[in-house]
Image: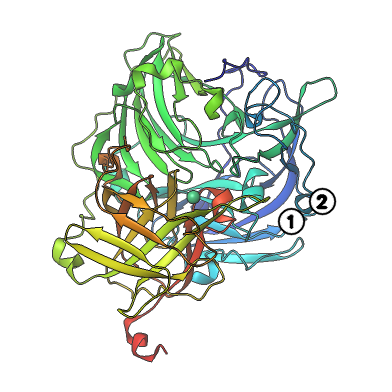
């Protein structure tokens, strides 16, 4: 561990902004959202930053829709000028003091990336979590240039949830979202109203958590210039400043009441493990989780003893009880997850000592809540929340198509590593090339790689309304949040594995590995599915040394969609693959 770093910005001085609300019902379901360059102040003591934003703001407006009431959005690309982010790879991973360069502002000796500087605003919008026809889902190659626009139709035939819309351009999503192109999208429905959940301000608070870094001027002061900095050892950006709804380490004044926090991790790569502290001690009992990616859980879940883990794109619907607190009480939301995240535990009781610049967590601060006087109101959580879904029954999965995906990192000389999702198919008996074996007790299955890169031939053709089981085998040292577009899925299991990859076992397409379903002696993770993951998910964390199995079923639209790692630096290079959902009647005609 390196020494604690002094923060160059004062925490907890800016009020938490609440993004402007765009309520679709008030505009007959027809919205126009310009995508514009703008100026945004991330902190009281910083100058304004040049950004790209929906409606020119960071975050974009929060769109609110009703289940069953379609929304049409005219996305108008009015971007002009170059990408307002300086992109660089520093020449060394640590500075002269031994501090990781990603923990400090400035370019750390890196040259601005000229290709990134030449990006001039092609964009495409994806509604993450939307059950959206393929034509409006934001296929990463279907771009709109500045001056072009598109009307996307969102049917909203789906349950209440917090989703988000963001840029999804092939190969450069990490820069578009970093520049500011993200906003929240809330769907509301009858079930939530029956439960009387807080809706709208002041007691419902959407929280978009991201991390950002900035430039330095000649005198060493932090500027507003957005900087996306990586280093020769870490190809993901893990910037030091946590930003909530566009402000670094903000402050929210709360009444002694129950609040509903709708939390979304919109960071490029960072996973958060959130802990609520008062006077340095965790008070996780104040938080009850009622919803996940696609809305309400069947039953409320307490926060796990370590804290609430949210990888990029994961959401949590939380009830936070501030009743019983005297005015002036302060509760601080801290992050205890070092980066890159590998699933390793960290007890909440140690949260006050979570700072670890050596592992790219120089400042654990996220935000602070300060209690102000007001009437005490407490919301009692009912025991039953969602009633519209069940875990898939065993017999529903018995004959399900099984798909196998290996998550693989390929090290390359002189350029950033390549991350891929290898789609595996069972190898024929006479297969002699590179193979992946998966041994589960007495049974060994041999696979070969059918696809590795985005542009390789499509191999997944799920049939509508039929369950499939996808198993994701992590052969890397980091946790990957894997996101599937279109319908949500349910997590069936996480199982520990040990594996061997021979030298040169990872080639461009070929993969050789021996995977066994048993715990590696050096493995310290518990590989459980937590109670708060037993809901409808669209992003699943796949930890090192594990196979995660998910039950996938597409129900609505046929067409070409994507699934990918939601670490943006991974999805851009090249952890993304297509799939095509098919009506059953067409399958006999597939060549
Ligand atoms: Cu990944």
* Residue drawn where x is 36% and y is 12% of the image: 325
User: Does dot 1 land on a helix, a strand or a loop?
Assistant: loop
Between residues 345 and 158, which one lies in front from this camera angle? 345
Compared with 62, 80 (above or below) is: below
Q: Is mark 2 within 8 Å of ligand 1?
A: no
* Residue drawn where x is 41% and y is 11% of the image: 280
- Label 1 Cα neighbours within 10 Å, binned few <14 / some 14-19 / many ≥20: many
- Give the image location of residue 481, x and y in percent: 44, 48
Residue 81: give its label. 2
* Residue drawn where x is 77% and y is 62% of the image: 147
- Name the outermost residue toward the front: 503
- Give the image location of residue 190, x and y in percent: 31, 50
* Residue drawn where x is 51% and y is 61% of the image: 576
State which tag comes first along the sequence, 1 or 2: 2
Residue 445: give its label. none
- Give the image location of residue 399, x and y in percent: 20, 72
Between residues 554 and 66, which one lies in front from this camera angle? 554
**Going by the image, does 373 lie left or right of 359?**
left
Q: Is residue 68 visible?
A: no
Q: CA distance from mark 1 to mark 2?
A: 8 Å
- Name the outermost residue toward the right: 218
**Going by the image, does 305 lie left or right of 43?**
left
Q: Is residue 296 visible?
A: yes
- Give the image location of residue 305, x and y in percent: 29, 26
> By what rule are the colours in the image chosen?
rainbow
Hey, which quadrant is residue 231 in on the image? top right
Hey, which quadrant is residue 322 in on the image? top left
Q: Are marks 1 and 2 in contact (CB under 8 Å)?
A: yes
Q: Which residue is mark 1?
A: 121
């Amino acid at each position: 561990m390196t020494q604690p770093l002094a923060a160059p910005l004062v925490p907890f001085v800016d009020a938490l902004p609440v993004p402007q609300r765009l309520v679709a019902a008030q505009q007959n379901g027809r919205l126009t959202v310009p995508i514009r360059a703008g100026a945004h102040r991330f902190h009281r003591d910083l100058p304004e930053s040049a950004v790209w934003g929906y409606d020119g703001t960071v975050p974009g407006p929060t769109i609110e829709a009703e289940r069953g009431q379609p929304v049409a959005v005219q996305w108008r690309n009015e971007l002009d000028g170059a990408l307002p982010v300086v992109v660089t790879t520093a020449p060394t991973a640590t500075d002269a003091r031994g501090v990781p360069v990603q923990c400090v502002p400035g370019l750390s000796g890196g040259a601005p990336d000229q290709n990134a500087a030449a990006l001039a605003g092609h964009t495409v919008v994806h509604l993450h979590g939307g059950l959206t026809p393929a034509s409006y889902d934001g296929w990463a190659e279907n771009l709109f240039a500045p001056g072009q626009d598109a009307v996307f139709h969102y049917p909203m035939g789906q349950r209440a949830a917090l989703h988000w819309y963001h840029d999804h351009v092939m190969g450069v999503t990490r820069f578009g979202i970093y520049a500011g192109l993200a906003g929240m999208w809330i769907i509301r429905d009858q079930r939530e109203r029956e439960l009387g959940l807080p809706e709208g301000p002041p007691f419902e608070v959407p929280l978009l958590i991201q991390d950002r870094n900035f430039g330095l001027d000649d005198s060493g002061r932090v500027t507003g210039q957005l900087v996306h900095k990586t280093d020769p050892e870490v190809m993901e950006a893990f910037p030091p400043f946590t930003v909530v709804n566009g402000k670094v380490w903000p402050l929210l004044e709360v009444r002694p009441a129950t609040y509903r926090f709708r939390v979304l991790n919109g960071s490029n790569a960072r996973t958060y493990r959130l802990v609520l502290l008062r006077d340095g001690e965790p008070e996780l009992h104040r938080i009850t989780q009622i919803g996940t990616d696609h809305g309400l859980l069947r039953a409320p879940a307490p926060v796990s003893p370590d804290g609430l883990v949210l990888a990029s794109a994961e959401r949590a619907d939380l009830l936070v009880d501030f009743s019983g607190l005297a005015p002036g009480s302060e509760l601080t939301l801290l992050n205890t997850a070092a980066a890159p995240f590998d699933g390793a535990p960290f007890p909440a009781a140690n949260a006050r000592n979570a700072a670890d610049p050596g592992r790219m967590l120089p400042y654990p601060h996220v935000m602070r809540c300060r209690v102000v006087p007001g009437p005490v109101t407490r919301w009692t959580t009912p025991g039953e929340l969602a009633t519209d879904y069940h875990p898939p029954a065993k017999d529903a999965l018995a004959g399900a198509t099984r798909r196998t995906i290996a998550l693989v990192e390929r090290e390359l000389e002189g350029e950033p590593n390549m991350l891929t999702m290898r789609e595996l198919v069972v190898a024929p008996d006479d297969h002699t090339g590179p193979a992946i074996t998966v041994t589960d007790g007495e049974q060994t299955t041999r696979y070969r790689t059918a696809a590795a890169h985005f542009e390789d031939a499509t191999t997944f053709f799920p049939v509508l309304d039929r369950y499939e089981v996808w198993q994701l085998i992590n052969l890397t040292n980091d946790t990957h949040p894997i996101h599937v577009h279109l319908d949500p899925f349910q997590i069936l299991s996480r199982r520990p594995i040990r594996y061997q990859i021979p030298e040169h076992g990872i080639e461009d397409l070929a993969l050789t590995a021996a995977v066994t379903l048993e715990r590696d002696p050096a493995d310290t993770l518990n590989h459980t599915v937590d109670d708060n993951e037993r809901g409808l998910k669209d992003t699943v964390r796949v930890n090192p040394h594990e196979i995660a199995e998910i039950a996938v079923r597409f129900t609505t639209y046929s067409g070409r969609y994507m699934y990918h790692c939601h670490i943006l630096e991974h999805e851009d290079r090249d952890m993304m693959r297509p799939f095509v959902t098919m009506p059953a009647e067409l399958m006999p005609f597939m060549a």
